[in-house]
Amino acid sequence: MLRRDVRIGVVTSNENKFIELKELAKSFNIELEQLKGEKIEIQSDNLEEISKTAAYLAYLTFRRPLIVDDSGLFIETLQNFPGPYTNFVKNTIGLKGILKLLEDLKDRSAYFMTVLTFTDGKIIKTFNGIVKGVISEEIRGNSGFGFDPIFIPEGEKRTFAEMSLEEKNKYSHRARAFAKFADFLMSYLEKA
Amino acid sequence: MLRRDVRIGVVTSNENKFIELKELAKSFNIELEQLKGEKIEIQSDNLEEISKTAAYLAYLTFRRPLIVDDSGLFIETLQNFPGPYTNFVKNTIGLKGILKLLEDLKDRSAYFMTVLTFTDGKIIKTFNGIVKGVISEEIRGNSGFGFDPIFIPEGEKRTFAEMSLEEKNKYSHRARAFAKFADFLMSYLEKA
């Protein structure tokens, strides 16, 4: 298969996530196409398990090379809450709820993790990306999505939501997972 | 099929839930047997969808008449958090986290809901039970499980965790769902 033929499906209904992935893919000359269909996510505190199952089930529907991206925010002093349940927690207790849970607690360390799973029906492979940081004292910024307005990555003073997409993509969890995937894909296609 | 042959599997790894169900089943002369195996729960804010999918997938494994019971606590002022994510929320932010989220909020109304799904491979049917109440100001009692120590049902002053199993079973969400199921099962078996 020639490199320029690479066109990978992305199963997600989250437009912001797709835009981020598309931007990341550009620098690797990978073309992504959004596949809109139900992404089945199981309940688990293990992102890898959620991601793998979702990719496996999506393949049964779409029957073409695809990736799924599952991400979560893990706050250590809250025993890794909210973990993989980003959308649910964002839509219920919201960012304010997270800040309330951390009131009066000194340790605000947290990390974002992405598990990206690729499958083409022959193989299924996961790629992890982690970015460490802290939860901010207040909600700041309005770019990005999810928990970006309360997460400050290590070595920064700004939240992810105060950065441009290019800046965030320099060292986000998603960028790290995607870079590993792109690396793999290159050698996988060469062998194919 | 004779009534005394009724033996229904219950897919759960939660011993407390099984004990409650077994106690409920007694008064209807239904015999329950715990089926230990992975219960697959999808992420959804719709308990019915979670329960139906779990029952469907469990049937593929066990191939015998079975029920699954999915329950959740829905706190109205928190947009129905924690909803179906009982175990995850209990094991991360815990009961204390819930109380903290409600600090300074006047409206503490909440409800427990159970969706019980029955399938025998021919039909799949769900039964709902709801009990309304409020979230207590502090953690009280140590019987029951899950969010019982912070839930006071309507017309009561005690939390579910301050009641005996018999008392709780008088009007719990689970008891109501089970009674509907038992009713159904009786006429279903008569026709069979």
Image (cartoon, coloured by chain):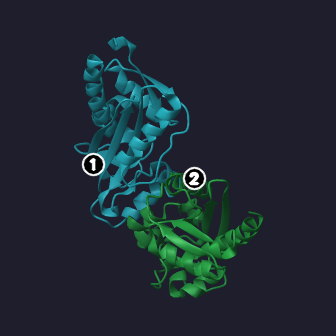
Chain colours: A green, B cyan
* Crowd around label 2: few <14 · some 14–19 · many ≥20 (10 Å): many
Rendering quarter of residue A125: bottom right
Element carrying mark 1: strand
- Where residue B83 sits: x, y (%)? 38, 53
Element carrying mark 2: helix
Question: Label 1 sits on what residue type?
Answer: Gly
Residue at image position (43%, 38%) is B56
- Name the quadrant of the N terminus of chain B: top left
Residue at image position (36%, 24%) is B25
Q: Is residue B153 left or right of residue A133?
A: left
Residue at image position (40%, 59%) is B99
Q: Nearer the viewer, residue B170 or B137?
A: B170
- Where residue B68 sits: x, y (%)? 42, 36
Q: Is residue A131 something that shows in the picture?
A: no
Q: Which residue is mark 2?
A: A56
Residue lying at the far front in this picture: please name it: A1
- Where residue B91 sits: x, y (%)? 53, 52
- Name the quadrant of the C terminus of chain B: top left
Q: Nearer the viewer, residue B191 or B95?
A: B191
Q: Is residue A116 something that shows in the picture?
A: yes
Callouts 1 and 2 close, C-beta under 8 Å? no
Q: Is A175 drawn above or below residue B65 in the view shown?
A: below
Q: Which residue is mark 1?
A: B133
Asked whether the residues under marks 1 and 2 belong to the same chain, the reply is no
* Crowd around label 1: few <14 · some 14–19 · many ≥20 (10 Å): some
Question: Label 2 sits on what residue type?
Answer: Tyr
Q: Nearer the viewer, residue B130 or B69?
A: B69
Give the CA separation, mark 1 to mark 2: 41 Å
Chain at numbered mark 2: A
Rendering quarter of residue A107: bottom right
- Where residue B126 sits: x, y (%)? 32, 38
